[in-house]
Image: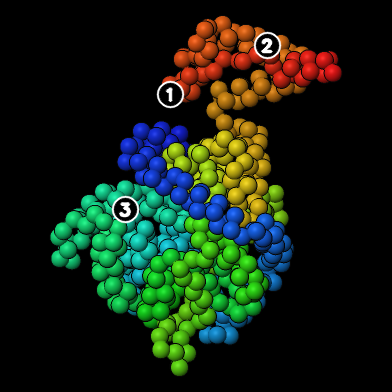
Amino acid sequence: MEVTSQKFKIRAGSALVNEGLQHALRKSRGGFVDKRQQAVDDLPQFEQLRSRAVDVKNHVLANLDKYLDEFERNVSAKGGQVHFASTPEQGVETIIDICTQAGAQRVAKGKSMIGEEMDLNDALEADGMEVIETDLGEYIIQLAREKPSHIIAPAIHKTRGEITELFYEHHQKYGLTERVDQVETIVNEARTVLRDHFVNADVGITGANFLLADSGASVLVTNEGNGDLTSSLPRVHIVTASIEKVIPSLADLTLFLRLLARSATGQEISSYTSIYSGPAKSQDMDGPAEYHVVLLDNGRSMMLQGEYREMLRCIRCGACMNHCPVYQSIGGHAYGWVYPGPMGSVWTPLLVGLQNAANLPNACTLNGRCGEVCPVKIPLPDLLRKLRHQIFERGLVDRKSRLGLALWGWLARHPKVFRFSIGMAARLLRRLAGRQGSIRSLPLAGGWTESRDFPAASGAGFVASWNSARKSR
């Protein structure tokens, strides 16, 4: 998948004036947030569970090689096969080899962010295979030839009207010639179209939310039944996951499931939690004849010993972007790669190179909400600040920003000059504001005053007020 993160400002500007996108974002805004808050309030031990989850994840990351070896042994013992891929290209090559050996012509695919990271769909189609996304949201954006804009709700940027037109355009070849515009009829039409693909697929590819080291099982958490059909009906099942998804045991899974659904969608538990443990046995009524797990590294092992190790605790719940005012204003596509929002602003520079994504860490107000709601307590604001520091040190900011930051740094190191300058600026702003108390146009602040007034300073600065209060005691 092409990385276009450096065009963030252009994409963000386009998103802000995209009426359809803004309508879709307004409808989704608050839903995830309010439901999550209610679910958290209903579970008094939520904070204790978060702390336990952090301990489990930190323990796994400190012993990742051990747990990956254990997972591989147990998959092999059940008749499956684990394939380790250092790069996305190796992962794609492995999956194409499996599909080729299976004589695959049609692939049914469930939602997988690792599949997106490997740009898997395009690679399979280039090799002559038909790939059908079976998750409703992924299916919608596949018809639109777009990428996911959210890691748990990939088509959140689409309005119902846009989906109606997509289905009308693409489903007529199946004899479905009416425009469907209600949620129920949209879902039923998608189910009708996808049913044939489930039955006739040669290979099913799914993601995995967790990997259980003690049993070699993969765990898929969804609110649709497509994951079970994709994994059990085709002759070959391929699981795609990243190496940090492994956890020790089923007992640990129960902990993470209680955090994941509440953080992601505000549910106590998702509709489907499926555990896959290798190919079908002779006594099984269904299941694949072959079972493969492709584990992608893509720089994660290098992160283990670095200052961004905490990012590997991420369980892909999407809570950070649901609470991010920037994401909620521009959607996910502006971020230019697989992972949007606060977590993407950390992940993308680490995985594709800081020089290719230098805009993203600055796409943040540092309000701290993402860190507050993360179920595994990843200090996202701190990590973003670290990346900003590296961006500045490596000269990856434009000249205007660099000069501005240098001036600010000089003022901060000279407090008397700083206080004098702030006082002068405050008096100037009050004079420009006049009786109305705000400024409608201000040089160097056009991005602000274009859509809102700039408030004048209300009085003395903080230091002057603090000194005055101290003297009056």
Residue at horizontal 17%, vertical 63%? 176
Task: Give the x, y percent position of residue 354.
Answer: 57, 43
- Please tell me how crowded label 2 is: few (under 14), some (14-19), or many (20+) other residues with Cα within 10 Å: some
Left or right, 156 with respect to 163, comes to right
Relative depth, front residue between 105 and 438 = 438
Task: Give the x, y percent position of residue 301.
Answer: 64, 59
Relative depth, front residue between 208 and 328 = 328
Q: Which residue is mark 2?
A: 423
The amino acid sitting under disc 1 is: Ser
Q: Secondary structure at mark 3?
A: loop
Mark 3 / mark 1, whichever is N-terminal: 3
Mark 2 / mark 1, whichever is N-terminal: 2
The amino acid sitting under disc 3 is: Arg
Q: Where 3 falls versus 167 (above or below)?
A: above
Q: Where 420 falls versus 91 (above or below)?
A: above
- Please tell me how crowded label 3 is: few (under 14), some (14-19), or many (20+) other residues with Cα within 10 Å: few
Cα distance between the residues tagged 2 and 1: 26 Å
Q: Is residue 194 visible?
A: yes
Q: Nearer the viewer, mark 2 or mark 3?
A: 2
Q: Secondary structure at mark 2?
A: helix
Q: Which residue is mark 1?
A: 451
Q: Where 146 falls versus 421 (above or below)?
A: below
Left or right, 447 with respect to 192, comes to right
Relative depth, front residue between 430 and 195 = 430
Cα distance between the residues tagged 3 and 1: 33 Å
Task: Give the x, y percent position of residue 147.
Answer: 39, 52
Q: Quadrant of the C terminus?
A: top right
Q: Is residue 352 visible?
A: no
> Which dot marks residue 145?
3
Cα distance between the residues tagged 2 and 3: 54 Å
